[in-house]
Amino acid sequence: MSDPSPSASTTVDVSAILQANNEKRRALNVPKEFPVETDLGLLAVYDPNPIEEESYALDKEQALLLHARDGIQLLVNEIWSRPTRIVDDGVVAEIPAVSTALPREKPLPKPAPMTKWQAFAATKGIAPKPRRDRMVFDEEKQDWVPRWGYKGKNKEVEDQWIVEVPGNKDPSFDPVQASKDERKARKQKNENQRLKNLQRAAANAAKGQEDKEKRLGERETRKKIIERELKITKGSTASMGKFDPQGRGEKKEKNVKRKFDPNEVEGKQERSKALSILEKIGATPSNKRTKMSTDNPEYGKDVASGNIINSRKAIKKLTGGKGALSLEKKGKRSGKGNRTK
């Protein structure tokens, strides 16, 4: 057999290479029907796309694993789309702040009450001074030292082993002790101001609480009055408000029963009840004294005494007990030319 010539063409199957490349690209670019929300501050992905039912029914664990892998791939793609910078350990991406609003475990802290100076500055429109840093640079030590406290910058004169005394001071003047006394005086002044601010804030809080309780007291009093009036109006119905529609926040009345009088009562009790009704409507029974003004000279005299004419008795005597209607009928029966005696 002779060797094949170098010029002979050879066939190379690259389909496997192309398929592997396509699979790699497909793994990096995850297609989604609905857009996915990402929060890089929390490194979280919110995927609203549902899981395929067929793949989930065949293999639940594999379906969940692929769904999670797609979400993580989208998160990684989003991270590396951010600006990057080089550090000692490698390349890092700049993560933005958290954009998802998470619920708090505890309520927001109340704002601290304003001090006397802060209230004065707010009234006069004075801008607050920028807050000073706790650390300051010491030129002599060439290092950062605390502004106050242990080895603070404010104790610079006290820590020196030799201090120059001004010429106008007494020879027994101690600059170290003077600096210490001045520092303690400033500290005591700040503490006194802090206590006064706390006392003022407590007084304002107590006054606000008192006003609140006063408003609540007036509201509760008004509420009780309305409830009492509502309870009284319920008595106008036959069921004493038992079957009336309940309002919002209205409590249901308990042990409310309608009381009925017995059908058979004594004559004296029935008579007193009827007389009380007549007195309420302003009627006067015939067997009682006629009510009249106290200025009337006939006040206090009985109707039967004859000084005052009783119209009922007069009509009764005139008609023979038939009443006033009989007089009217008698007048109608008498025609023209007839005389009535």
Image (spheres, helix red, strand yellow):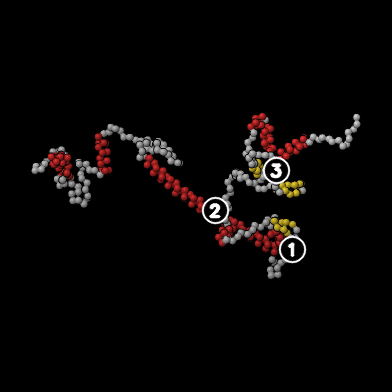
Look at the numbered disc 1 and give the secondary structure of its residue: loop
Between discs 3 and 2, the one toward the N terminus: 3
Q: Position of residue 275 (x, y in %)?
A: 25, 40
Q: What is the CA distance from the residue labelled 3 to the residue labelled 2?
A: 55 Å
**Is 340 left or right of 8, judged from the image as shown?**
left
> Which disc number belongs to residue 77?
3
Q: Is residue 85 above or below residue 65?
A: below
Residue 39, image quadrant: top right
The residue to which callout 1 is attached is: 162
Q: Is residue 316 in view from this perspective?
A: no
Look at the numbered disc 3 and give the secondary structure of its residue: helix
Q: Position of residue 327 (x, y in %)?
A: 14, 41
Q: Residue at x 22, y 46 (%)?
A: 291
The residue to which callout 2 is attached is: 202
* Of the two numbered discs 1 and 3 in the rendering, the one whose residue sits closer to the viewer: 3
Q: What is the CA distance from the residue labelled 1 to the residue labelled 3?
A: 65 Å
Between discs 1 and 2, the one toward the N terminus: 1
* Extreme-right residue of the structure: 2
Depth check, front residue: 81 or 216: 81
* Extreme-bottom residue of the structure: 168
Q: Is residue 277 in view from this perspective?
A: yes
**Is 80 left or right of 210, judged from the image as shown?**
right
* Category of crowding for the residue at label 2, using alpha-carbon neighbours closer than 10 angstroms: few (below 14), some (14–19), many (at least 20): few
* Category of crowding for the residue at label 1, using alpha-carbon neighbours closer than 10 angstroms: few (below 14), some (14–19), many (at least 20): few
> Which disc number belongs to residue 333?
none
Q: Residue at x 75, y 60 (%)?
A: 140
Q: Position of residue 274 (x, y in %)?
A: 26, 38
